[in-house]
């Protein structure tokens, strides 16, 4: 909660389907996951994930990074990727997310999605141990980035 001139006010929460689903995934909130349903490639959803992924990479790695740190993250992701995405592809996705000029033309939409999703969850839950408020703020910022680009992410209905 933030304290303002008028007293406590609730922290702004994400409103998009993807924003809330990412929150539920990080918190492993099975009830919310069931209510929201499976990840959907709908209106602005992939863009929200991409923006959230880039924001969390900035928090995790800062302005510069060591390639071994990136590879360590990818090694940690492999258990969760369950051999659905190769280490090389996951590393490429992370390095591209950090702004490195790497060839991503060979990546499938699925491998990019799974790599971003698993990296986001791992960094938020394990590396940064984000509080609910910090996670909400990051996801709201990701939604705002998407909205500023002219897209309106699909809103969640709970």
Image: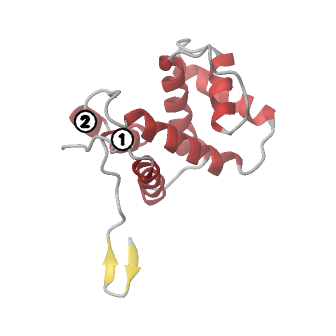
Asked if the residue under mark 1 is in contact with the one under mark 2, i.e. CB atoms within 8 Å, the reply is yes
Residue 12 horizontal/vertical position (percent): 35, 62
The C terminus, quarter of image: top left
Which quadrant, please, contains the N terminus? bottom left
* Of labels 2 and 1, the one closer to you: 2
Residue density around tag 1, few if under 14, some if 14–19, many if 20 or more, within 10 Å: some
Considering only order in the chain, which callout, 1 or 2, is on the residue closer to the N terminus? 1
Name the element at disc 1: helix
Residue drawn at point x = 73 percent, y = 35 percent: 100
What percent of the width, then of the height, locates residue 39? 34, 28
Up/down of 110 relative to 125, above or below: above
Q: Residues within 10 Å of mark 2 (few under 14, many from 20)?
A: some
Q: Which mark is residue 59?
A: none
Residue 1 vertical position relative to residue 93 in the rendered view, above or below: below
- Identify whether 64 is placed above or below 35: below
Residue found 74% across the figure and 51% down from its top: 63
Image coordinates of residue 133 in percent, x first then y, are: 43, 60
Q: Which residue is mark 2?
A: 36
Residue at 30% x, 26% y: name it: 38
Residue 121 against residue 146 in the figure, above or below = above
Q: Secondary structure at mark 2?
A: helix
Q: Which residue is mark 1?
A: 24
- Inter-mark Cα distance, 2 to 1: 9 Å
Q: On the image, which quarter does residue 95 sit in?
A: top right
Q: Residue furthest bottom?
A: 5
Residue 70 placement, left or right of 83: right
């Amino acid at each position: 909660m933030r304290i303002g001139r008028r007293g406590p006010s609730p922290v702004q929460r994400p409103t998009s389907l993807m924003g809330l689903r990412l929150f539920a995934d990080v918190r492993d909130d099975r009830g919310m996951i069931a209510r929201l349903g499976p990840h959907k490639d709908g209106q602005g959803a992939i863009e929200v994930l991409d923006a959230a992924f880039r924001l969390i990479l900035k928090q995790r790695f800062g302005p510069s990074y060591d390639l071994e740190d990136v590879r360590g993250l990818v090694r940690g992701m492999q258990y969760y990727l369950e051999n659905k995405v190769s280490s090389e592809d996951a590393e490429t996705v992370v390095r591209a997310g950090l702004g490195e000029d790497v060839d991503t033309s060979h990546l499938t939409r699925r491998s990019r999605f799974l790599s971003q999703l698993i990296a986001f969850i791992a960094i938020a839950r394990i590396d940064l141990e984000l509080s609910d408020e910090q996670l909400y703020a990051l996801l709201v910022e990701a939604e705002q980035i998407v909205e500023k680009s002219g897209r309106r992410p699909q809103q969640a209905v709970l």
